[in-house]
Image (cartoon, rainbow, N blue to C red):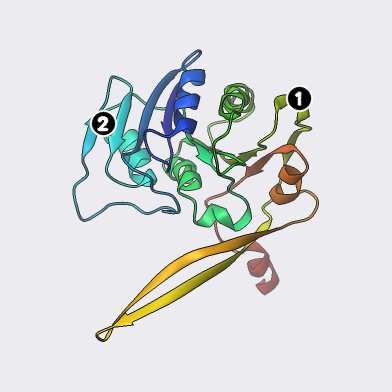
Amino acid sequence: MTILLTNDDGIKAEGIQSLFDTLTTEHDVFVIAPEDERSACSNAITVRTSLSIRQIDDFHFAVDGYTADCVNIGLNGGFFPPFDIVISGINHGPNLGDDVYFSGTVAGARTACIFGVHGIALSLDCLDSSSYFSQASEFALRFISDILCRTGDQPIFFNINYPNIPKHEINGIKYTRLGRRKYNDIYTIHSENGSSKIIQLSGSIESIGGDTTDVFELRNGFISVTPLSIDCSDHEFLRILR
């Protein structure tokens, strides 16, 4: 299998390095990631300026753009062989509920699906240093081999959150729906000489979700696997109208 790895934490991030080391034991893997951290960039792409690509070695490439740029270049730039799947991560921190709309990690997998390739976003539930990147990488190795043999040609798109606990404490895998995230952002405004600057201070995030949500299952020690779709149509409202 030929795999494209990307992320929004940057080419030097521990999570993507761990994935590369693990996946290359069985697959052909290329890393195409942002030169610097691009967290919370969502599906931003560069359309009016050029992008620089720095080749680090035969398998690692850094792009001075966004995560979606990296996937777009990897799939459509003509530099690489066709990819069977794009894996975005491992993100340093969870991507739960409404995070999927802001996350650059999730956008990497979403962009793959838009272009007709399977996409997986993988996040570790830890914002600080963690010793569990390697076991999350091993899970990814097993997961892609299992799930792709069960799917057809239709591209699939998963958001996976891995608990920040030892392997023997993980209760299993749960296929989940999205919960909710309430962002309590705090800003301060500085005004001077008729000009104002607004600065975001440290806020807080409240995770909300009952049984079968990613929030609930991750909190209870399960690996949360949420199948997503690029179709944002409100089908329920259309059904009501009809």
Residue at 69% x, 33% y: name it. 165
Q: Residue furthest left?
A: 50
Which residue is at the front of the view, 5 or 86?
5
Label 1 to label 2: alpha-carbon separation: 43 Å
Q: Which residue is labeled 2 in the image?
A: 78
Which residue is at the front of the view, 143 or 205?
205
In this image, 116 relative to 216: left or right?
left
Q: Is residue 159 above or below residue 238?
A: above
From the image, state whether disc 1 or disc 2 is nearer to you.
1
Q: Is residue 193 above or below residue 115?
A: below
> Is residue 158 among what the camera can see?
yes
Q: Is residue 40 above or below residue 82?
A: below
Which residue is at the front of the view, 3 or 187?
187
Q: Secondary structure at mark 2?
A: loop
Disc tally is: 2
Q: Secondary structure at mark 1?
A: helix
> Is residue 1 among what the camera can see?
no
Residue at 33% x, 43% y: name it. 36
In this image, 6 relative to 231: left or right?
left
Residue type of the residue flagged with mark 2: Gly
The quadrant of the image that shows the C terminus is bottom right
Q: Residue furthest bottom?
A: 194
Residue at 78% x, 42% y: name it. 220
* Classed neighbour count for the residue bearing mark 1: other residues with Cα under 10 Å, few (<14), some (14–19), many (≥20): few
Give coordinates of residue 239: x percent, y percent: 68, 66
Q: Which residue is labeled 1 in the image?
A: 168
Residue at 23% x, 36% y: name it. 53
Give coordinates of residue 133: x percent, y percent: 56, 29
Residue type of the residue flagged with mark 1: His
